[in-house]
């Protein structure tokens, strides 16, 4: 079956003439999806869901401003939605691992990475613009507004950079999981030495 792989470990103890011999049998699957699942994409998906919700909620104050903010090109909406989709896919893929789901997850990670690069560039531009406006003396009466915008954009930029690191990691392990197409099964049988005493 293409979709699921299992890692089974069995330990049995057998007796022979009063002596107990330990027989360790270990059946390990080196199938590629274990490389993805063992890095716990579910936990990282939950973190991405939190960042997606934060992106959406913190973007609403930016919508009311007349200045150039990241809301100008609706970054909080589409980036928050991308984070939520990637988080949900990561959680679902760990629960139901299959090659198709890892492929879909990898595609969404790459699309979200491109979106993060766009948003980081635009937010850095916005922060530079806020700093230039704030340094001018005739804008000092709007001090609170600029500090609020500077704070929100800085937090959103920081969260985008954190998700960028998560996405690079998830993309790497998903790519490595899909790179290997052959399966290996290792069977290890280690009996204890028998004593031939009469």
Image (cartoon, rainbow, N blue to C red):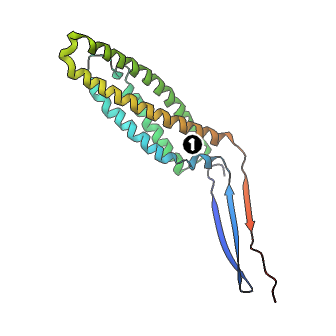
- Across and down, in percent, residue 19 comes to 72, 83
Closer to us: 163 or 21: 21
Mark 1 surroundings: few (<14), some (14-19) or many (≥20) residues within 10 A: some
Q: Quadrant of residue 9?
A: bottom right
Residue drawn 36% across and 33% down?
A: 55
Q: Is residue 11 above or below residue 116?
A: below
Question: Is residue 82 visible to us here?
Answer: no
Q: Is residue 20 left or right of residue 161?
A: right
Q: Where does label 1 land, which residue?
A: 101
Question: Is residue 185 visible to us here?
Answer: yes
- Across and down, in percent, residue 34 comes to 61, 50
Residue drawn 63% across and 43% down?
A: 177
Residue drawn 67% across and 39% down?
A: 179
- Across and down, in percent, residue 3 comes to 62, 49
Most extreme residue toward the left is 141
Q: Is residue 184 above or below residue 152?
A: below
Residue drawn 33% across and 20% down?
A: 69
Q: Kindly state the secondary structure of the residue where label 1 is placed.
A: helix
Q: Is residue 78 left or right of residue 181?
A: left
Q: Is residue 84 left or right of residue 17?
A: left
- Across and down, in percent, residue 48 comes to 43, 39
Q: Is residue 156 above or below residue 18?
A: above
């Amino acid at each position: 079956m293409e979709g699921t792989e299992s890692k089974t470990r069995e330990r049995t103890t057998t007796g022979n003439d009063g002596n107990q011999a330990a027989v360790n049998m270990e059946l390990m699957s080196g199938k590629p999806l274990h490389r993805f699942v063992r890095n716990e994409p579910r936990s990282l998906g939950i973190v991405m869901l939190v960042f997606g919700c934060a992106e959406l909620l913190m973007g609403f104050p930016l919508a009311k401003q007349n200045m150039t903010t990241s809301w100008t090109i609706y970054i909080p909406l589409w980036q928050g939605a991308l984070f939520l989709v990637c988080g949900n896919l990561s959680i679902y893929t760990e629960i139901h691992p299959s090659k198709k789901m890892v492929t879909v997850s990898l595609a969404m990670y790459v699309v979200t990475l491109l979106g993060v690069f766009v948003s980081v560039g635009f937010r850095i531009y916005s922060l530079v613009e806020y700093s230039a406006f704030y340094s001018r003396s005739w804008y000092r009466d709007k001090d609170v507004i600029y500090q609020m915008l500077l704070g929100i954009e800085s937090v959103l930029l920081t969260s985008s950079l954190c998700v960028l690191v998560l996405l690079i990691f998830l993309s790497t392990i998903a790519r490595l999981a899909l790179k290997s197409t052959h399966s290996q099964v290792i069977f290890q049988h280690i009996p204890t030495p028998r004593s031939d005493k009469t």
